[in-house]
Amino acid sequence: MTNFTAGNKFQKYLGDLLWNFFFTITAIFLNGYRYGMGDLEEHLPQVFKKLNPKLYPYDYFTVPATTRFTIREIYVNTISFFSHLFPVATVCFAFYLICTFCIVAYTRKITAFFFKDPYSAYISPVLLLIFLHSWTVGGNEILDYELTCSVFSSAFCVAAFYYFLREKYFTAGVLIGFATLYQLLQGLQFYGIIVLLIALLPTSKKWQSVGKISTGYLLAGAYMLIPIFYRQFFMPHANADMPRFYQILTGIYSGHYKASAFPLKNYLQSISLIVVTLGLLAVTRNEKFRLFATLFGIIVGGCVVYYCTTELFHWNTIYKLQWFKTTIWISFFASVIIAGYAGKLLSGFLKINPYQPVVLILLFGVVIWQSLFVYSVPGIIRKSWAGKYMVGPYYPKSDLTRMHEWINQNTPADAIILSMPFDVAILCETKRSTPTGSRAIIHEPDFILNWYDRFAKIYAIDTCSENTPYLQRLIQAAPNYRQETNKELAPKCQYDYRIANIGTPGCAGDTLNIVHTEGNYALIKNNLH
């Protein structure tokens, strides 16, 4: 009997590992994975420069980002440390797998903490990462599709909530502190939610619990909290036009900052999750109703305060809190509760042991097939899905990516490349300096103001139209660039080469200076500097 019990425990342990990895790879299989573009323009150039200091000597973003302490510091050190042993792309995908696995594993543990039926913990990660992950307000999700700082932070926060439920407050505080090291706002917001939750709920040793979680949080997160808070709130910006800074910041990134700019659909989705979750708990008279009502109250109350202070009273400093980012936790908590009640219903008519050898063998086969699919192995992946997973050597690359890679392999490390205004992979893929760009931004007054003026100058944006929203002004940049040749562009900024669309007036005017083409793109040498 003892051996049989031990065998069952071991089988359950292996089964849980396999199920967790199944949900992990399924999330990637359905959602996709990106590398070397988008938000990683703010992350990876600093890693590449740390590995090779000769890169980006004249870059508008990487130079200031690597000569000061930034919120990407721990991320950069983490990726660069392991990139001495493995390629950066491999390290990023490995950490993405690990973080997603942790989110899955602790989501299942949290679900099992609240619900004892056999199926709830199998439903919650599916709801969270596949069906409800984008049911948030403010353009944020609990899991990005590439390895950003937020992916690390989400993994630590989900784990922290599990230990909070187990009343291991110091451990929870340390984990939230680690989340803050990777994504300051997300970690700080989650810490605030948990502390307010403890304070508002009728629990024994309330302030002792707050003390434990705060001690762990400050010990783990101080390395990031102290320098960033000093720079954001106490370092004077004597030469900065602060009203204009906030106009540019909230105008261009209104989808993250301005509550009035968020789509109505997102509000309705989050409200419906709250109503359904609390409705299920109230109808069944679940003892955890007060816990989740308080959690949702803290998040929604913060959103109301954020809106009033920023858009009614115009306290611009509050924009830095981006409180609507906390709506990712509405999606998280709702996924757990809805899964719990769905699991209870399912257990009434379904009797399957998820740890049966036959089930696990079939599951293992599915995981292997999905892994080969995600790796874009020829003969496995469907052509219509090709390019969805930017991992491994087989995924098809766009003409622009091939142009970037050619530049990386055939131009000097100190070359300066000017590209189309919304080329969101130029820094990661060329590993070359650029005079300006639209994705890699340091959200501080001195940088934002200088960046915007430089971007507007290079791409001939009309900055005098006060009634034209900032985001709409930036959209003018693309057609303007298509019209300009080296003759117009060279006086505005220093560059050695530029990328242009073949067939545009700007490219046609510099046809004799084309040094390479890839599909619809041409690399044009600047002979006027």
Image (cartoon, grey):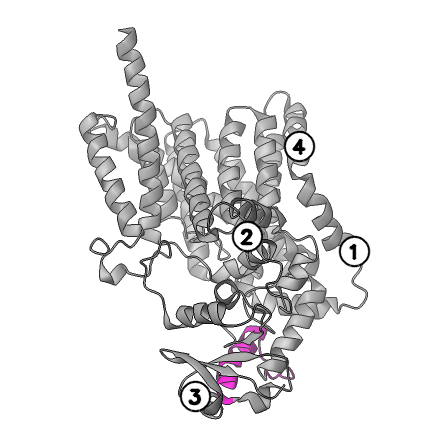
Within 10 Å of disc 2 (Cα), the crowding (few <14, some 14-19, many 20+) is: many
Depicted 214 relative to depicted 487: above or below: above
Res 163 seen here = yes
Determine which of the numbered discs, if any, sits on residue 504 in the image: 3
Q: Is residue 384 rendered to the left or right of residue 134? A: left
- Label located before the other in sequence (2 or 4): 4
- Label located before the other in sequence (3 or 4): 4
For the residues labelled 3 and 2, the Cα–Cα distance comes to: 41 Å
Three-letter code, disc 1: Met
Within 10 Å of disc 1 (Cα), the crowding (few <14, some 14-19, many 20+) is: few
* Position of residue 371 measured from the top left corner of the image (x, y, whole percent): 29, 46
Q: What is the secondary structure assignment of the residue under circle 2?
A: helix
Q: What is the secondary structure assignment of the residue under circle 4?
A: helix
Determine which of the numbered discs, if any, sits on residue 324 in the image: 2
Q: Which residue is mark 4?
A: 214
* Position of residue 353 measured from the top left corner of the image (x, y, whole percent): 22, 25
Mark closer to the observer (4, 1): 1
Three-letter code, disc 3: Thr
Give the extent of the magenta segment: 461-483
Three-letter code, disc 4: Ser
Within 10 Å of disc 3 (Cα), the crowding (few <14, some 14-19, many 20+) is: some
> Magenta segment: does it hold 214?
no
Three-letter code, disc 2: Phe
* Position of residue 199 measured from the top left corner of the image (x, y, whole percent): 63, 31
Depicted 431 relative to depicted 140: above or below: below
- The residue that appears at 38% across and 27% down in the rendered structure is 112
Nearer the observer, 445 or 496: 496
Q: Is residue 154 rendered to the left or right of residue 282? A: right
